[in-house]
C-alpha cells in the first residue's frame, strides 16, 4: 500500500535521510523509532507530501507521490487516504474556528466523509464540545479532535507524528487505548513515529529503528524487544521499561 524506496533528504550539508526503504501493508501498524534528529519526522513529511525528497521517493498503491500531480483524481484519493495526527494538537487546530468546524473541514474536499457527530463518537468526545474553541478544551481533548479530523475522510493510513508527547501520562494511556481500538475496529494502518518505545510496542506489530537518517534494524516488535541485533536498538531497548508488546 505505502512504499518508501531509497528515500534521501539533504538540507544544505546535512543529510537527514539516507537511502530509506520500507513498506506498509493494508491494516499493518509500523513504528518508526530513534533518537531526536534521527530523521523520523522527515520521513513522515515526505509520506504526506510536505517535503520533496532529494532522491528516491514514496508511492501509494503504486502511484508515485509528486507535488505536481496533486490535482489529478488519483492524487486526491491519496490525499484522502493518508492523514496526519500531529505532535502538538493545540497548534494544529485553528484558534479562530470551533473544534467542530476544524473536524468538518476535510469533508469539503472529500465526498463521502464522516460527519462531525460520527467522528466525535469514534474518538470519545462529547458532541457538545463541537461548538467550543481549542483554548476551551484540554490538550487531550484537542488531540482527540485532531484524530477525529484525520478520520473524517475515511483514511486508510494515519501518520502519527509523536502524537502522545504533548500529553501527560494518564492521557497518553487513554489515547493509546483509543488508537488501538480504532485499529481493531477499522483496520487502519499506522505509521507511528515516536521516540517512546513503550508506546510503539503497545500499538505496532513491526518496528523500524533509525539512526542518523538510516534504517539500522527492522523487525517484528516481539523480536526487537527480546533480541535486538543492532547496538542502537539494544541501547533503546535497554533504556525502556517495556512491559508488553504488540498491537492491543
Image (tube, rainbow, N blue to C red):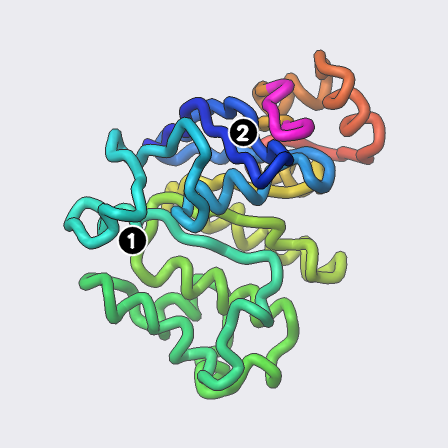
Image-based side of 77 in relation to 134, left or right: left
Residues 203 and 32: in front is 32
Residues 231 and 211: in front is 211
Within-10-Å neighbours for mark 2: few <14, some 14–19, many 20+: many
> Going 58% across and 20% down the picture, which residue do you hit?
218
Majority secondary structure of magenta residues? strand
Range of residues picked out in magenta: 210-217
Within-10-Å neighbours for mark 1: few <14, some 14–19, many 20+: many
User: Which label's residue is closer to the chain start, 1 or 2?
Assistant: 1
Image-based side of 17 in relation to 99, left or right: right
Helix, strand or loop for disc 1? helix
Q: Quadrant of the N terminus?
A: top left
Q: Foreground mark, 1 or 2?
A: 1
Residue 60 among magenta residues: no
Q: Position of residue 125 (x, y in %)?
A: 50, 72
Q: Quadrant of residue 174?
A: bottom right
> Going 47% across and 23% down the picture, which residue do you hit?
21
Residue 184 seen in the current view: no
Q: Position of residue 217 (x, y in %)?
A: 62, 18
Q: Identify the residue at the far front of this view.
A: 12
Residue 147 seen in the current view: yes
Labels 1 and 2 touching (C-beta < 8 A): no
Residue identifier under label 1: 80
> Going 47% across and 41% down the picture, which residue do you hit?
190
Q: Quadrant of residue 248?
A: top right
Q: Which mark is residue 205?
A: 2
Residues 182 and 214: in front is 214
Residue 214 among magenta residues: yes
How many marks on residues? 2
Residue 21, compared with residue 90, is above or below; it is above
Q: Position of residue 243 (x, y in %)?
A: 76, 34
Residues 156 and 121: in front is 156
Amino acid at each position: 500500500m505505502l512504499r518508501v524506496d531509497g528515500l534521501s533528504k539533504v538540507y544544505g550539508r546535512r543529510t537527514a535521510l539516507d537511502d530509506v526503504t520500507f513498506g506498509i501493508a493494508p491494516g499493518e501498524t509500523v513504528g518508526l523509532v530513534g533518537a531526536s534528529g534521527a530523521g523520523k519526522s522527515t520521513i513522515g513529511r515526505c509520506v504526506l507530501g510536505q517535503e520533496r525528497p532529494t532522491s528516491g521517493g514514496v508511492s501509494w498503491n503504486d502511484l508515485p507521490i509528486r507535488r505536481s500531480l496533486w490535482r489529478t483524481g488519483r492524487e486526491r484519493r491519496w490525499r484522502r487516504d493518508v492523514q496526519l495526527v500531529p505532535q502538538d494538537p493545540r497548534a494544529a487546530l485553528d484558534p479562530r474556528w470551533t473544534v467542530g468546524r476544524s473536524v468538518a473541514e476535510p469533508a469539503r474536499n472529500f465526498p463521502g466523509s464522516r460527519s462531525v457527530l460520527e467522528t466525535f463518537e469514534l474518538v470519545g468526545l462529547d458532541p457538545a464540545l463541537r461548538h467550543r474553541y481549542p483554548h476551551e478544551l484540554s490538550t487531550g481533548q484537542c488531540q482527540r479532535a485532531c484524530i477525529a479530523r484525520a478520520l473524517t475522510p475515511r483514511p486508510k493510513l494515519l501518520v502519527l507524528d509523536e502524537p502522545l508527547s504533548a500529553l501527560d501520562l494518564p492521557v497518553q494511556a487513554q489515547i493509546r487505548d483509543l488508537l488501538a481500538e480504532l485499529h481493531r475496529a477499522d483496520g487502519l494502518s499506522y505509521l507511528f513515529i515516536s521516540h517512546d518505545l513503550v508506546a510503539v510496542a503497545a500499538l505496532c506489530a513491526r518496528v523500524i529503528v533509525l539512526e542518523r537518517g538510516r534504517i539500522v534494524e527492522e523487525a517484528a516488535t516481539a523480536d526487537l524487544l527480546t533480541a535486538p541485533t543492532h547496538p542502537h536498538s539494544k541501547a533503546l531497548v535497554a533504556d525502556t521499561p517495556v512491559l508488553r508488546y504488540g498491537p492491543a
